[in-house]
Image: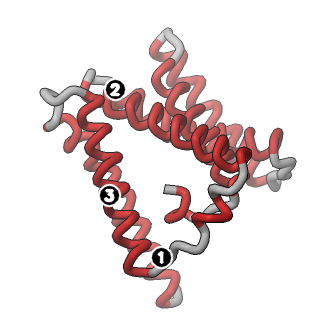
Amino acid sequence: MSAHERRGALLALACYMSWGFFPIYFRLLAPVPTIDILANRMVWSLGLVLLILAIRRDWSWIGPALSSRESMLTFGGAALLLTANWFTYIWAVNAGYVIESSLGYFVNPLVSVLLAVFFLHERPRAGQWIANVNATAAELCETNSNAQLPWIAMGMALTLGFYGLLKKRARLNALHGL
């Protein structure tokens, strides 16, 4: 494994570990209303993104990005979808639906693949189809074992999937998309 690959693997591990601790963090905030937690997350994220953009002096993309009605609708739609996703996630964790919220993020790649196939006309390879069929089977088993539709998981997977689709259509990098 090259140094670059090792660094990527370590960063991925750190990312997944931090995401794994989010439910614990949000449970500690359970007495705080979900909307307040979400508002704080949005404000602090905006501040951090603006700070990073200022340090990098990376402002040239804003004018073209805000110049058309279509891009503004795309950004607005993406922002609403991400807000709905995070609201649902925070509420679900604090209401005791940690497993179902985790299932939503597990199912999200399946939704993203389907959206890419239908809207972006991408063609997954055979191995990717096999992985998606296996994950779909796992989702169906989980749904069957609970004897009810996982509405929270479905809502989270759909909002995050369509958010990703809109961001891809907007052609923004990860930082600019925030």
Q: Which residue is mark 1?
A: 8
**CA distance for labels 2 and 3:** 20 Å
Q: CA distance from mark 1 to mark 2?
A: 31 Å
| Of pointers 2 and 3, the one earlier in the residue sequence | 3
Which numbered marker is on residue 167?
none
**Position of residue 84 measured from the top left corner of the image (x, y, whole percent):** 47, 31
The amino acid type, in three-letter code, at marker 2 is Ala
- Where residue 49 sits in the image (x, y, percent)? 39, 63
Q: Mark 1 vs mark 2: which is more N-terminal? A: 1
In the figure, is residue 33 to the left or right of 155? left
Q: Is residue 33 above or below residue 73?
A: above
Q: Considering only order in the chain, which callout, 3 or 1, is on the residue closer to the N terminus?
A: 1
In the rendered structure, the answer to whether residue 175 lies left or right of residue 55 reads: right
Q: Alpha carbon of mark 1 to alpha carbon of mark 3: how far? A: 14 Å
Give the total of numbered labels: 3
Residue drawn where x is 25% and y is 37% of the image? 37
Q: Which residue is mark 3?
A: 17
Q: Nearer the viewer, mark 2 or mark 3?
A: 2
